[in-house]
């Protein structure tokens, strides 16, 4: 179990370091397209390097989806969430330390790739738009993960699961960066918000509640059998890896 938790912490660190690091350190050079692929490639890197250890959830909403789908034991869920938040916080800290090495960097002005909505944040979308986007995007993301890693999927298809999941996350970012900066992951939002404070912390509840609701809904949809061919039963909650 300790090895799984360390893998979850490292994997979530990779996600925040790649994704938020790209936004903070290279955002002006690569734009929203580049940032989108940085988040997606981070998932690919973590999935293929750590997936065999912990399943590379890297996201409390994903772990909740697995729990609700009956594919993760409750005993592991809390530990995964703590490890994910710790990894995201450490990732944000490292991005901050690197960014601080530039003379004109300001945490208040440049931020850490934190999520947000409303006046002064990117496209200035409303609270309602932010909630709808995060819930729907997380539902889609977790549905893809659960379906791509299900027990009935062939070995050849499962081998490509990490790529499919990473590309899905990149696609979600292409749609929603201007809306919320894209969370679909409470840990990814908590990490930067801890250091940025202010509006990032005030907005944080949106990026905890909506992704968790979307992840839970995806898990229930998967448990219902919607994503399984007729006659197949769900895999037992063994805590088996995603990949």
Image: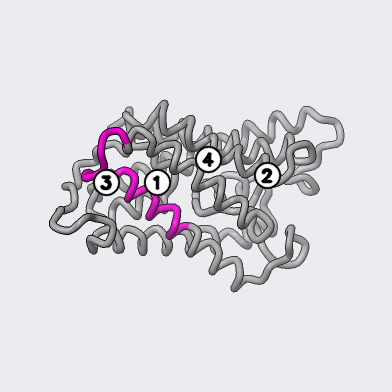
Q: Along the polypeptide, which appears first: circle 2 or circle 1?
A: 2
In-front residue for pair 56/230 = 230
The Cα atoms of the two marked residues, 1 and 4, are separated by: 11 Å
Task: Check disc 2: other Cα within 10 Å, few if <14, some if 14-19, many if 20+.
Answer: some
Residue under label 4, please give it.
88
Task: Check disc 3: other Cα within 10 Å, few if <14, some if 14-19, many if 20+.
Answer: many
Instruction: Count the numbered circles shown.
Output: 4
Residue under label 2, please give it.
33
Measuring 23% from the left and 60% from the top, which residue is drawn there?
Answer: 225
The Cα atoms of the two marked residues, 2 and 1, are separated by: 29 Å
Q: Which residues are magenta?
A: 138-156
Helix, strand or loop status at disc 2:
helix
Are circles 1 and 4 on residues that touch, CB within 8 Å? no
In-front residue for pair 82/229 = 229
Height in image: 162 above or below 177? above
Q: Along the polypeptide, which appears first: circle 1 or circle 4?
A: 1
Give the main secondary structure of the magenta stretch. Answer: helix
Residue under label 1, please give it.
81
Are circles 2 and 4 on residues that touch, CB within 8 Å? no
In-front residue for pair 83/237 = 237
């Amino acid at each position: 179990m300790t090895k799984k938790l360390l893998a979850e912490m490292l994997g979530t660190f990779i996600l925040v370091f790649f994704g938020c690091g790209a936004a903070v350190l290279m955002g002006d050079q690569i734009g929203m397209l580049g940032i989108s692929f940085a988040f997606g490639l981070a998932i690919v890197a973590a999935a293929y390097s750590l997936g065999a250890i912990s399943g590379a959830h890297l996201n409390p909403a994903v772990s909740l989806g697995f729990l609700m789908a009956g594919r993760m034991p409750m005993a592991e869920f809390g530990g995964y969430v703590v490890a994910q938040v710790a990894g995201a916080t450490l990732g944000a800290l490292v991005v901050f330390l690197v960014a601080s090495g530039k003379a004109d960097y300001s945490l208040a002005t440049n931020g850490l790739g934190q999520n947000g909505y409303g006046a002064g944040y990117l496209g200035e979308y409303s609270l309602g738009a932010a909630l709808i986007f995060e819930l729907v995007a997380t539902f889609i993301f977790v549905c893809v993960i659960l379906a791509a890693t299900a027990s009935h999927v062939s070995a050849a298809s499962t081998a490509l699961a990490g790529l499919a999941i990473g590309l899905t996350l990149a696609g979600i970012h292409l749609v929603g960066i201007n809306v919320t900066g894209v969370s679909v992951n409470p840990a990814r939002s908590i990490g930067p918000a801890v250091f940025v404070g202010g509006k990032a912390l005030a907005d944080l509840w949106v990026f905890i509640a909506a992704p968790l609701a979307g992840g839970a809904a995806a898990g229930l949809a998967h448990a219902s059998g919607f994503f399984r061919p007729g006659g197949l039963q769900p895999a037992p909650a063994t805590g088996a890896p995603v990949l």
